[in-house]
Image: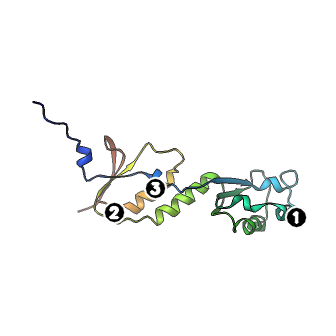
Amino acid sequence: MADPIVNKIAKSPLVTIDLEVYKTEGTRTFIDISQWLEEGILLREKPFRAILQKQDWSVYQGQHVALDCTSDAILPAWATLLITAYLSPFAKTLVQGSLQDLEKHLFSKTISTLDLSPFKGKPLMIKGCSDTSIPEDAYIQLVQRLQTVAKSLFYGEACSSVPLWKAKK
């Protein structure tokens, strides 16, 4: 009679961390400031303020918003701040930059507040082959935080992992 098949990975103390689990829920929106500039490049204060006052900012209720200008316009600092003042009561998150910058910000916030106690003294596998929308920076921040508590860190899948770091004894 053949020996039963044993799943050694399931019995391993290795804890897998999948960053997809920590992805912030919600709609992500990019707002291009150039839409409110004359010919997409010229900001005249009075018409700019008038356009912003007429906007229905409530459409961004609860959304994660990235705010930037895609044209080559040179904007005064107050322009972005004025838009921020209108958006703040509605947007859940607001960053200046691209949608990628927004995603980095959201992951950074999540990783910085992550409860590390379940990972203390354990070998940890940071799951690879995740959703491509997870910024590489999130993995870097995660490794930095986990090094403070982990026994060891690996990247990939249990069947084909890359050792990253091991605590000194």
Name the residue nearer the viewer: 59 or 86. Answer: 59
Q: Which amino acid is tagged 1?
A: Ala
Would you name the residue on which mark 3 appears? 140
- Which of the labelled discs sits on residue 74, or is there none? none
CB under 8 Å between discs 3 and 1? no
Q: Is residue 101 left or right of residue 82?
A: left
Would you name the residue on which mark 1 appears? 50
Q: Is residue 82 above or below residue 64?
A: below
- N-terminal-most mark, 3 or 1: 1
Local secondary structure at mark 2: helix
Name the residue nearer the viewer: 105 or 1. Answer: 1
Residue depicted at x 67% and y 53%: 29
| Image-quadrant location for residue 158 | top left
- N-terminal-most mark, 3 or 2: 2
Does residue 110 appear anywhere in the picture? yes
Please state the horizontal and vertical placement of residue 96, each as a whole percent of the image. Answer: 67, 60
Q: Is residue 126 left or right of residue 41?
A: left
Please state the horizontal and vertical placement of residue 119, each as a whole percent of the image. Answer: 33, 61
Would you name the residue on which mark 2 appears? 118
